[in-house]
Image (cartoon, grey):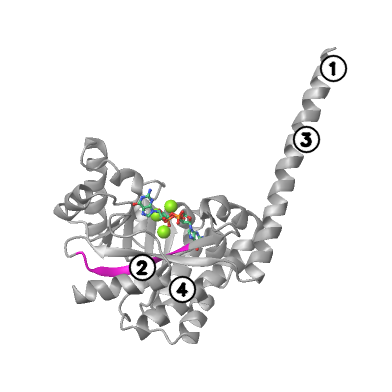
Amino acid sequence: HAARESGVALLHFNAGMAAHYTERLQLAGRIHIAIDRGEFLLHFQPIMDAAEGSPVALEALLRWPQLDGSFIPPADFIQLCEDTGLIIALGRWVIHAAARAQQQLSAAGWQHLPIAVNVSAVQLFNSDLVGEFSRAMQDHGLARGALQMELTESVLMRNPTQALQTLGHLHANGVGVALDDFGTGFSSMSYLQHLPLDSLKIDRGFVTDVESNPRNAAICRALLSLGHSMGLSVIAEGVETEGQRRWLAAHGCDQVQGYLLGRPMPLEQVLAMLDESRSA
Ligand code: C2E
Ligand code: MG
Ligand code: MG
Ligand code: MG
């Protein structure tokens, strides 16, 4: 009886596993086709000077539009793309699409507004990232500093030596580097100090209740002081209220990003918003 029971359990387990893998395989197939057909889109979210409110950069965020008008969020497909290696082709498309967008910005008089691209570990360690950025910048006639990239701490700590080398090459080519979701990983400070970084992005989790939670306020103050002592500019992510922006500006935060300043949006909307800010 016990054997039959465990046999049944095993059967269910296998069926569940099989369904899971079939689903992932099907999704990977759909992503592959969507890359080939050019179905992915970039949206852009403004990053503003914390005190002045003027735009200083845009972050490119990947969107996968569906036939019903909805979007599949990156959280639902980036991990799978990393696991399957699809992130290399998709990430290459993102770099080139961001370069094309910056070219359009430049044509509209915004050549000093860089676009930041999110980069995965697989791209950093298993693709010609330096070449990809150079080609994209060259193909679109971009100046040094027109593109930036965002990496998380855990990505860098995976292979510090290779990361140092690749970041050095990118930096030499005029691609600025920001450390994304800062405070959530486990960076060795002595190691970070040697990396060619330009900015730290304080993770949204610490910003949400910065005014009411003394612990998160202390963490934000510490991250601001850490970043500034390393000569980096500090950006706060997920700023949703004027109160948060005021707190951050008062504590010396350089730049803010979040729904308060603007949601991720298509380039045409960004251009319209920028035109308004220029005439204001
Ligand atoms: P991230 O790089 O930390 O991007 C910030 C995320 O926070 C974005 O989510 C953005 O839409 C969201 N966000 C911005 N402001 C606010 C706010 O005020 N409140 C709240 N609640 N959320 C805010 P999104 O677009 O869903 O992207 C999620 C993550 O997916 C990104 O986190 C990034 O790690 C990854 N991702 C997005 N695009 C790419 C890409 O092209 N390549 C790679 N490798 N990863 C990407
Ligand atoms: Mg980012
Ligand atoms: Mg982030
Ligand atoms: Mg994130």
Q: Nearer the viewer, mark 3 or mark 1?
A: 3
N-terminal label among 4 and 2: 2
Distance from the alpha carbon under mark 2 to that under mark 3: 45 Å
N-terminal label among 3 and 1: 1
Instruction: Name the element at disc 2.
Output: strand
Mark 3 closeness class: few <14, some 14–19, many ≥20 residues within 10 Å = few
N-terminal label among 1 and 2: 1
Instruction: Specify the label residue 15 is tagged with.
Output: 3
Q: Which residues are magenta?
A: 53-61
Task: Inspect the image, locate mark 1, and give the three-letter code of the amino acid beneath it.
Answer: Ala
Instruction: Specify the label residue 3 is tagged with.
Output: 1
Residue matched to label 4: 98
Q: Residue at x 35, y 44 (%)?
A: 205
Check the image and report above or below for 176 versus 158.
below
Check the image and report above or below for 99 versus 215.
below
- The reply to whether the C-beta atoms of the residues labelled 1 and 2 are less than 8 Å apart is no
Task: Inspect the image, locate mark 4, and give the three-letter code of the amino acid beneath it.
Answer: Ala
Residue 212 highlighted magenta (yes or no): no
Residue 217 in view (yes/no):
yes
Distance from the alpha carbon under mark 1 to that under mark 4: 58 Å
Q: Residue at x 39, y 52 (%)?
A: 181
Tell me: is circle 2 under 8 Å from ligand 2. no
Instruction: Name the element at disc 4.
Output: helix
Q: Residue at x 21, y 56 (%)?
A: 253
Residue matched to label 2: 58
Farthest-out residue, left: 250
